[in-house]
Image (tube, coloured by chain):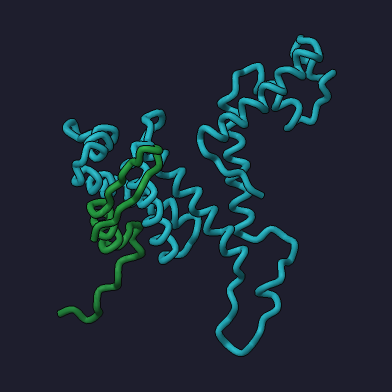
Chain colours: A cyan, B green
């Protein structure tokens, strides 16, 4: 059932920015379960989830207090994006710092990569693919069409030109603008694409 | 009579109360000051 008197996230955010601390508690309580589940689904460890959850809200608090939050998107997707980036940071750090056992036994396989994608790498790669798909969907239709044909269907610009009814030069131009726009979107949404 | 102790509930997908409380306290104690050069200074007044 929809609560008629529920205060919107954007109102709570505005109130919090203006100094009403209680609004933060409402926002945390409202979204904690969803955010926590989201982080846990990625890191599969309760303590790490707790840390990432805490770091996420510390970033949220600092950003809001600095007045750097803009209302372009909605609050929850913004918070989820911060959490998502922190999860990636976590995997990067753990990759750099392999864990050693505390026993006398030394397991060489704990520090040697096997060259295959492990679960973390696979997760990061899936997230990158998903981010890129979302970026492609935000492009203007004619740019998206050319980019999909070139990158996903491996078509030549001559074939693209024949299929879309535009000149090769126009197809090349659309591809160029598609890449420029994707870079702008990456900067705008502060997306980290790593491999 | 309860023969078996209640099985602990499955892992609940929410943070510990202490974590939430920490965040609330952290927020209350944090003051951000903007300098003339438009930099930010974070003051954590515990």
Which residue in the rendered view is the most extreme toward the bottom? Answer: A104
Quadrant hosting residue A153: top right
**Residue drawn where x is 26% and y is 63% of the image:** B18
Q: Where is A91 relative to A183, above or below?
A: below
**Residue drawn where x is 21% and y is 41% of the image:** A19
Q: Where is A4 relative to A101, above or below?
A: above
Report whether residue A1 is seen.
no
Report whether residue A186 is seen.
yes
Counting every numbered tag in the picture gives: 0
Does A108 sit left or right of A130 as displayed? right
**Residue drawn where x is 40% and y is 51% of the image:** A56
Q: Whole-percent x and y of residue A185? A: 56, 30
Q: Where is A98 relative to B32, above or below?
A: below
Q: Whole-percent x and y of residue A131? A: 57, 39
Q: Whole-percent x and y of residue A92? A: 58, 58
Q: Nearer the viewer, residue B4 or A114?
A: A114
Does A114 sit left or right of A61 as displayed? right
Q: Whole-percent x and y of residue A113? A: 71, 67
Q: Nearer the viewer, residue A133 or A88?
A: A88
Quadrant hosting residue A141: top right
Does A178 sit left or right of A153 as displayed? left
Q: Quadrant of the N terminus of chain A?
A: top left
**Residue drawn where x is 73% and y is 17% of the image:** A173
């Amino acid at each position: 059932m929809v609560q008629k008197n529920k205060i919107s996230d954007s109102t709570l955010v505005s109130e919090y920015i203006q100094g009403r601390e209680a609004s933060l508690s409402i926002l945390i309580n409202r979204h904690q379960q969803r955010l926590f589940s989201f982080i846990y689904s990625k890191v599969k460890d309760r303590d790490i989830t707790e840390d990432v959850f805490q770091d996420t809200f510390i970033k949220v608090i600092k950003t809001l207090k600095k007045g750097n939050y803009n209302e372009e998107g909605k609050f929850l997707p913004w918070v989820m994006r911060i959490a998502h980036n922190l999860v990636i940071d976590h995997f990067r750090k753990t990759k750099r710092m392999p864990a050693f056992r505390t026993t006398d036994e030394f397991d060489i396989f704990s520090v040697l990569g096997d060259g295959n994608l492990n679960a973390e790498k696979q997760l990061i790669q899936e997230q990158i693919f998903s981010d890129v798909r979302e970026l492609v969907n935000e492009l203007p239709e004619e740019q998206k069409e050319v980019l999909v044909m070139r990158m996903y269907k491996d078509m030549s610009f001559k074939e693209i030109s024949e299929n879309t009814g535009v000149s090769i030069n126009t197809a090349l131009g659309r591809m160029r603008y598609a890449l420029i726009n994707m870079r702008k979107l990456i900067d705008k949404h502060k997306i980290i694409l790593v491999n | 009579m309860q023969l078996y102790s209640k099985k602990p509930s499955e892992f609940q997908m929410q943070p510990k109360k202490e974590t939430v409380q920490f965040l609330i306290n952290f927020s209350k104690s944090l003051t951000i000051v903007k300098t003339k050069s438009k930099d930010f200074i974070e003051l954590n007044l515990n």
